[in-house]
Amino acid sequence: MEPGSARDRLHILFDDARAEQKRAMAALPKIRLAWLGITAGLMALTLWMVFLWVPTEINQGNIQRSLYFHVPVAWTAMVAIALVAVASVAYLKTRDEKWDRLAVAGAETGVIFAALMLITGMVWAKPVWGVWWTGEAKLTTTLILFFIYVAYLMFRAYFPPGEQRRRLAAIIGLIGAIDTPIIYYGAQLWERAHPSAVVGRSVDGPVGLTLLVATVAFSVLFVYVAGERYRLRRQEDEVAALRRAISLQPSRSVSSTPSPGTTPESVGGAPAGGA
Amino acid sequence: MTTPAPVQQGSPTRATGTTQPAVLAVEAVGLEKSFGNSAVLRGLDMTVRDGEAVAIFGANGVGKSTLLRTLTTLTRPDHGSISVYGRDLSKEAESARLWLGAVLHSPMLYGDMTVRENLTFFGKMFRVPDLDERIEELVARLGLGARLEQRARELSHGYQKRAALARAMLHRPRVLLLDEAETGLDEPARKVLDTVIAEHRAAGHAVVMTTHSIERGIAESDRVFVLAGGRIALDAPSSRVTPDDVTDLYSDPGEA
Amino acid sequence: MGASLATIWTLARKDLLLELRSRDIVLAIIVFALLVIAIFTFAIELTPSRSRDVGPGVLWAAVAFAGVLGLNRSFAVEAEGDTLDGLMLTPVSRELIFFGKLLGNFIFITIAEIVIFPVFEALFNISVLQVETIVIALLASIGFSAVGTAFAAVSVRVRSREIMLPLLFLPTSVPLIMAAVESTSAVVNGGSWSDFSDWLQLAIAFDVIFVIASAVLFQFVLEE
């Protein structure tokens, strides 16, 4: 092989990346901007309905309004876990990195929404039930899932990037998803065995409509956030691929090899771990 | 245990009846493997014929061990395929493992079990039919007799290597993969290793070894590979290679 | 089938032999669990009714936490001499290797429970040595070893695996821990099978699902 070939390959790689970027810049912003617009619009509508339109609940007062956030984020957290499960299976089947990125995006967003669900639940429970925490089945389930997916993200942060990490993470993500219905069933049994002051909530009329709109709004928000996270992941991977291409160059000096400890991916796995 | 005997010697695949009757013991095509951001194998092709001993050389960290681990099915290549006597490792790994015996850097023995217990355990895993006789035979060949009832942890490095060799050869593999097996061995153990390699070659089986000692590698092999830049940079009959040919490629892999 | 069972047993017996030589795993589980139980006898003033209230929770929390220690060892043993590689080189299917390790871990946890239960009974003055609790303990051991074997294999190559395994294992096992605690509670409060049949069903479902799921996923764990 002639000495110039690796360099040429590198140039081709750079050109490919640049062309790809141009195409992405041309096509994506429109969709992304539109999606962002829809998200913002729906969120504004949700806020208006929650705080101005829907009448105050008679028994609980204003605090009941937190329910309009609590239920939608709980829903999106579940969607996120389903996304992790589907993407993990797809990854194990195809070994295509895009599924791994999708799974991480789902897990990171899911952990944040699960945390929001727990916080809004506690804020609501304190004035209504007099305690921050009750053994309510959905809260319990979300708390445990929160721990499982925090562990999932921590595992990714601890493990060096590469195929092995993607594969093992997919296994963890999948086991967590398999566990979800079992946890929920157990939490329901537990709730029945330890009855707390859970009141039956009637959801109808303006309350139901507000919940519906809020749920749609948060779903749209979830897709936007997860999509952005996915894009960021892909860009990180592209940077990593370019680095790899550079390290492939038959170097004459040892010092040109990048040290493995400073790869962008090894930093990227960490952020949501503390969420 | 009345278990089906593993397929023993005899032609594993029908030799193609052409003028070149050589059966390919190992055929690797387009192997690629990277760890994190460093690519180790970059489209490596290699073939080893039945009855051929191959020595693989290469500078430190160039990927010799990765290549050997990939050939043993321990490491899965990112791209490319390997077949052993025509069996694709990605599809028929379990049966292909019957053909492969490997001695890698660590002896892969349970430290708290005796040599005999280790060999019996691994022999059962391979379903060796005449296990006790086979162990006695290998122990005699490798000079392990006095160490048979000692725990693997208590053995010297040389005897651990001998025990590892015995473990690798229990199931009568046709391809012997040796990763720097001679490193740190004392003279008697080294002789045993040489004899094993010679006998394996003489029996018409394949040997794939990596070694730091270039003279020894050339002397004990039929063919020499030099691994550089993630590929086989030199593939030549051992009789026509000098140590200098090999070391020249260590520092300047791009100029092959 | 017979040959597969023989292979599983060969694998488990190998773990038992190693354990007999080193006594790492079972001893660690027993000592740690008893320590947890003993600390609780000081932390809580134990009246008979309070013993029945908190006892089952303490017992199973102790077993779960101590079990993690043992599970960690079970793959650390394989990692130390690279014998995991040695196992991978054998033509044995990955499912059988999984079941072999699972059987070994199940035996270790069960042996530990045999020691832990009587001591717990003595310290907490509540009777847990009954047919019902033994069934519960067996179901719990199966589930713990299924999830534990899979996660121990997942975390064996990660740095700080001593931290990683409990973080993965404990939340996943929560339904099983709940089932064990609630069933044991029912038993020590004089309940019969029908009082905790729901919980038993949950434990059985957990065991079946995770034995199968872990066995299927295990083949993906050990690639490199």
Image (cartoon, coloured by chain):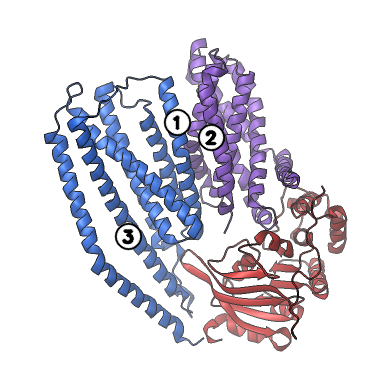
Chain colours: A blue, B red, C purple
Chain to which the residue tagged by mark 3 belongs: A
Give neighbour class at mark 2: few <14, some 14-19, many 20+ (Cα, 10 Å): many
Q: Is C133 situated left or right of B169 in this image?
A: left
**Looking at the rendering, which quadrant does residue C62 occupy?**
top right
| Tag 2 and tag 1, C-beta contact below 8 Å | no
Q: CA distance from mark 3 to mark 2?
A: 37 Å
Report which residue position mark 2 lands on. C206
Query: What residue is shown at x 75% (from left), y 75% (from top)?
Result: B50
Relative vertical location of residue A179 with respect to residue B162 in this rendering, above or below:
above
Query: Which amino acid, by three-letter code, is at mark 3?
Result: Arg
Q: Nearer the viewer, residue A51 or A115?
A: A51
In this view, the residue farthest toward the front is: A205
Query: Which amino acid, by three-letter code, is at mark 1?
Result: Tyr
Q: CA distance from mark 2 to mark 1?
A: 11 Å
Query: What residue is shown at x 73% (from left), y 65% (from top)?
Result: B99
Report which residue position mark 3 lands on. A231
Where is residue A153? Give x, y as percent.
Answer: 41, 48
Report which residue position mark 1 lands on. A185
Q: CA distance from mark 1 to mark 3?
A: 36 Å
